Image (cartoon, helix red, strand yellow):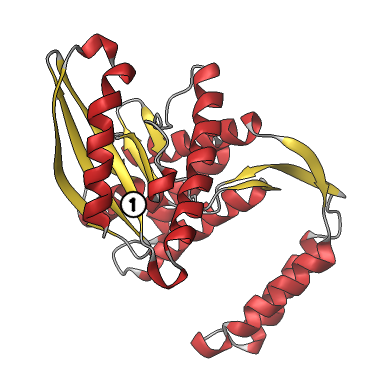
Amino acid sequence: MSENVVEQIVAELRQCLSSFYPERGELRNIRVVGHTPKSDHFIYDLVADFSNGGERLAAKVYRAGKLGAQHARNQAHAEYNNLERVYEQFVQHDLPGVPRPIGNFSALGAVVSEKIQGLPLQSMMMKAALLPGYDDNRTLRDAAAKAGEWLSNFHKLTADAPQIFDPQQLLAELENLCLSCRGVGLDDEAIRMILTGAKNSLVKAKKSIPSSAVLNDFSPLNISVTEDGIAVCDYGKMSPRGASFSDAARFLASVEALEKYPFCNREITGRVQQSFVEA
């Protein structure tokens, strides 16, 4: 099914792609050079050959699954709108790190954009853990700082009115989360310590918190480190409005979770978290 969609995408790109790259001259060919299967979508790598060079594209094709083709189209439509909104904001402020959308293929359940070449931040952390001396030149810390700068810019450009902060609701959610972790080793003493610390921290909490668009998936695995800084290429889970802090919290928690790997220790995750927070 996804192969048929890609064939239709390629056919449409043959008709319109030259308008996106007039400086490249005549479009000679479009090739599918690989694909990566995910749980709810495929990513197809495309190469467009022009008379004056080439361009790499990524086609994200949602799986129809049990919810049907219309659900896939709705997902693609939402992601395309998210990507277009963020790309326009970043371009207006001359900021890199967001892929350019190429046409609207949401009717096919797909999102097509320029492919930004980079290495996932999580892969860099694994290299730093396995290869002594890999991070001696601050590569990892600089990448984490760039991630913090990118997220700060994203929240500023999509900022909305502050939202009311309810400490009791947060504590209730935290308690439910702790209770659900009892079966995987979190004992009652640890739960009491977590909840007591949270209550003490929230005593002087502000009545409102910043809100903006929220990515809901800002983690080291979804952050690409490039020559120009970092890039975020997936906007499928983005919400138009939410608590800005949730993206930062998810990143910090995702970094800490990598300590489950024996070779990824607190020294590495701590450096990443510190550089990210400072930025």
Residue shown at 20% from the left, 51% from the top: 35
Q: Position of residue 200 (x, y in %)?
A: 80, 64
Residue positioned 38% across, 29% down in the render: 229
Q: Quadrant of residue 50?
A: top left
Q: Nearer the viewer, residue 203 or 137?
A: 203
Q: Quadrant of residue 210?
A: top right
Residues packed near mark 1 inside 10 Å, few (<14), some (14 to 19) or many (20 plus): many
Q: Nearer the viewer, residue 187 or 161?
A: 161
> Observer-nearest residue: 180 or 135?
180
Query: Can residue 144 be seen here?
Result: yes
Judge left or right: residue 105 versus residue 71: left
Q: Position of residue 255 (x, y in %)?
A: 45, 57
Q: Position of residue 42 (x, y in %)?
A: 29, 55
Q: Secondary structure at mark 1?
A: strand
Q: Which residue is mark 1?
A: 61
Specify whether 167 is left or right of 37: right
Residue 127 left/right relative to 157: left
Please state the horizontal and vertical placement of residue 216, each as a whole percent of the image. 55, 53
